Image (cartoon, rainbow, N blue to C red):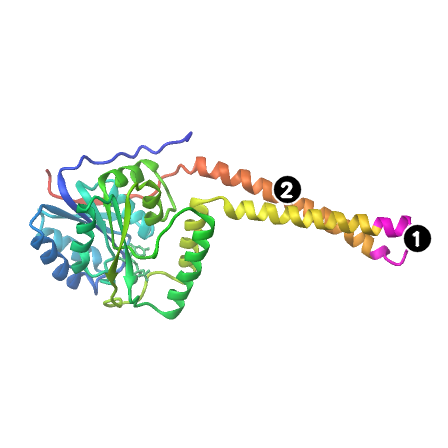
Amino acid sequence: MVFKFFVSTTPSTLPLSIVIPVYNEELNLPTLFARLYPVLDALGRRYEVIFTNDGSHDRSIALLKAQHAARPDVTRVIDFNANYGQHMAIMAAFERVRGDVIITLDADLQNPPEEIPKLLEQIAAGHDYVGGYRLNRQDSLFRTYASKIINFVREKTTSIEMTDQGCMLRAYSRQVIDAIVRSGAINTFIPALAYSFASNPAEVGVKHEERHAGVSNYSFYMLIRLNFDLITGFSLAPLQYFTMFAGLCSAGSFVLVLVLAYMRIFLHDDTNGVFTLFGILFFLLSVTMVGIGLIGEYVGRTYQVVRARQRYFVKEILEAKE
Ligand code: UDP
Ligand code: MG
């Protein structure tokens, strides 16, 4: 890569870090705190929880600050100046985690904190990346089926294999997190990026609950954007398919032009004058499409290299000094 971000990782000084992105979750945070901390305390190992407030408009940041005051030893809060999206919120925490093992989960309790030990077992068994897949997914039919389609497209266009890309309850080893941070990726899909850096990934079924309160933060448009990032961020297949399709059109219309020319010149069949014009037009049009496809290909490749820009802005960090 030509351009590089000046991102670095924080040395690991703890066994476990929990990373939670928060966007307008005031109704869920009290229950999340009440369920999460006892699970972590019961593990009997030192840990930290990093919340990233992703530009919430509700009382989320006030609740996070209160939680930091209540458990300053184990709670850290990153406060963004604006909304940068779930995956950037996670990324900012990854850049600051101190744990050897890092676990992500959602703040809305769709990923039950009680499932964390299951993931840790798999890490203890030697896996460097453990992805959760949702048993009995509790989402709308539309979301569930849309996920199935995008899973299929992802399988066909990238080399990423996972049962349930949308489940954010996942555990990562330090090496995988370091690689993610060093990649300096923007507009990325973290579970897929992690998979590409893992050498011994595993999957485990985890419970899924309905959103505890409030509604999903993902609008239809944001879901489309996210899935676009998933496909275009990990493969140039869409561009390549387009170019191939344009090539086929071009070949087909060239044959059409030849047939029409033969009929006109050798069979003196003039009834197809308009079709001849159409034939030529189709041919030129498909040549243009090949051209656009090729340009797109190069733009795509350039884009992969030049994606250097400030990814998020941190307003404040609340943490106990080490
Ligand atoms: N989230 C975020 N920034 C956003 C959207 C969501 O930090 O712009 C967080 C949100 O607070 C939650 C997680 O990402 O912890 C998943 O979001 P949500 O539950 O809305 O998504 P869904 O479960 O519907 O996919
Ligand atoms: Mg949710």
Question: Helix, strand or loop at disc 1?
Answer: loop
* Residue marked by disc 2: 291
Q: Would you say residue 81 is visible in this rendering?
A: no
Q: Position of residue 220 (x, y in %)?
A: 42, 62
- Taking the magenta stretch, the answer to whether it contains residue 72 is no
Label 1 vs label 2: CA separation? 34 Å
Region rendered in magenta: 261-274
Residue type highlighted by circle 1? His
Q: Position of residue 308 (x, y in %)?
A: 40, 36
Above or below, 9 against 127 in this view is above
Question: Helix, strand or loop at disc 2?
Answer: helix
Q: Residue 91 carries which label?
A: none
Q: Which circle's residue, 1 or 2, is located before the other in the chain?
A: 1
Instruction: Identify the image quadrant of residue 115.
Output: bottom left
- Dot 2: within a 10 Å radius of its alpha carbon, few (fewer than 14), some, or many (20 or more) residues? some
Indicate left or right for 318 with 145 as reference. left
Indicate left or right for 206 with 295 as reference. left
- Furthest toward the top, the residue is 2
Instruction: Identify the image quadrant of residue 100.
Output: top left
